[in-house]
Image (spheres, grey):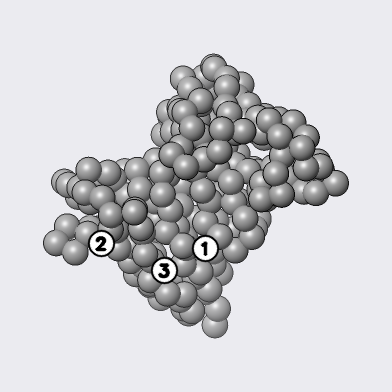
Amino acid sequence: DIQMTQSPSLLSASVGDRVTINCKASQNINKYLNWYQQKLGEAPKLLIYNTNNLQTGIPSRFSGSGSGTDYTLTISSLQPEDFGTYFCFQHNSWPWTFGGGTKLELK
Amino acid sequence: QVQLQQSGAELAKPGSSVKISCKASGYTFTSYYISWIKQTTGQGLEYIGYINTGSGGTNYNEKFKGKATLTVDKSSSTAFMQLSSLTPDDSAVYYCARGSGYDWGQGVMVTVSS
């Protein structure tokens, strides 16, 4: 199985900060990488699909990049509603797998 | 708008089975497969498998073969997942999702306890 390693696992930041979350795959996943945000007690919500495609309705402060084994989610200017846990997910090689999550908390 | 409405929480005894439903609306049901995902505090998110809503064909993560059975009823735009021979390790929140995760159901908490 492809291992998805997210870093950092915990990120403390302030409103207005630029934030980056990284996801490293154990093999090339050909940009089949999604990013999700999850808030406590809710289902994950898709932010970015296939590395850099912004899901409908998601603010443009979210962006994604990467290729091969290394991928990044960037939030250009953190807003109060952005705090929560972020997951990456690869759907290139079976079985599809998730990263362990990055908890983004208020500094 | 797209909605995936899952059935309610389940409390089950070890060795028993449960069947969770996922009713889709707001899009053409047979245009997207339905994925199933398990979430626990310890193991995080695990992808169980998916079902082709048009053909009924399935693809399972090896880890969940024999544990999960995915089915679909096209007439009601509903997908189902049966979990069998339950153990405490099956206690989790289970989600359905459209395609590779475009939209998610609200999740079903399954608790396995004697």
Residue occupied by mark 1: B93
Could you say where residue A44 lies in the image, as x and y percent from the top left? 53, 51
Cα separation between marks 2 and 3: 23 Å
Give the residue displayed 21% in from the left and 49% down from the top: B28
Could you say where residue B32 lies in the image, as x and y percent from the top left? 27, 44
Query: Label 2 is found on which chain of the structure?
Result: B
Residue occupied by mark 3: B85
Cα separation between marks 1 and 2: 19 Å
Q: Residue A83, relative to residue B69: is it above or below? A: above
Give the residue displayed 63% in from the left and 43% down from the top: A86
Task: Point out the residue furthest to the top here.
Answer: A68
Query: Label 3 is found on which chain of the structure?
Result: B
- Indicate which disc, 1 or 3, sits on the residue closer to the N terminus: 3
Foreground disc of the pair 1, 2:
2
Helix, strand, or loop for circle 2?
A: strand
Tag 3: amino acid: Ser
Q: Judge if badges 1 and 3 mark residues of a common chain.
A: yes
Cα separation between marks 1 and 3: 17 Å
Residue occupied by mark 2: B78
Helix, strand, or loop for circle 1?
A: strand
Residue B79 in sight here = no
- Res B42 → quadrant: bottom right
- Indicate which disc, 2 or 3, sits on the residue closer to the N terminus: 2
Could you say where residue A40 lies in the image, as x and y percent from the top left? 64, 60
Tag 2: amino acid: Thr
Q: Residues within 10 Å of mark 3 (few under 14, many from 20)?
A: some
- Res A100 → quadrant: top right
Q: Residue A50, relative to residue A35: is it above or below? A: above
Res. B49 mark: none
Tag 1: amino acid: Val
